[in-house]
Image: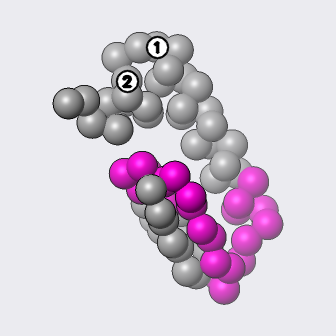
Amino acid sequence: MVSYDKQTVNSENFFARYAHRNRLKLCLKILSKVCDHSSTIFDYGCGDGTLLNELSQKKIGGNLIGLD
């Protein structure tokens, strides 16, 4: 079984990797502008939690919830 990470942001397929990394960057950019430290961010379909992990590291949002 191939991990979620290897199918998306770290895929061997250039196009899949490019698409997922750009989607992630765009989400981070938008959320950093509209969310403060008290915001709750719910990631429905979070997979392995890549987006939520990035948000946590960048201190975006106060309450991060993921459901896959």
Quarter of the figure with the C terminus:
bottom left
Q: Residues within 10 Å of mark 2 (few under 14, many from 20)?
A: some
Q: Determine which quarter of the picture holds residue 59.
A: bottom right
Q: Determine which quarter of the picture holds residue 63.
A: bottom right
Amino acid identity at mark 2: Ser
- How many marks can you see? 2
Name the residue at 60% across, 68% down: 42
Name the residue at 37% across, 51% down: 48
Seen in the picture, residue 61 relative to 47 is either above or below; the reply is below
Residue 6 painted magenta: no
Residue 41 painted magenta: yes
Residue found at the far top of this picture: 14
Amino acid identity at mark 1: Phe
Q: Which mark is residue 56?
A: none
Q: Which residue is mark 2?
A: 11
Residue 23 x, y percent position in the rendering: 63, 37
Q: What range of the chain is rendered magenta?
A: 30-52
Residue 2 x, y percent position in the rendering: 25, 29
Quarter of the figure with the N terminus:
top left
* Res. 33 in view: yes
Residue found at the far right of this picture: 34
Q: Residues within 10 Å of mark 1 (few under 14, many from 20)?
A: few
Seen in the picture, residue 21 relative to 63 is either above or below; the reply is above
State the residue in front, 39 or 48: 48
Residue 16 x, y percent position in the rendering: 50, 20
Under circle 1, the secondary element is helix
Name the residue at 42% across, 49% down: 47
Under circle 2, the secondary element is loop
Residue found at the far bottom of this picture: 38
Q: Which residue is mark 1?
A: 14
Left or right of 39? Residue 18 is left
Left or right of 45? Residue 50 is left
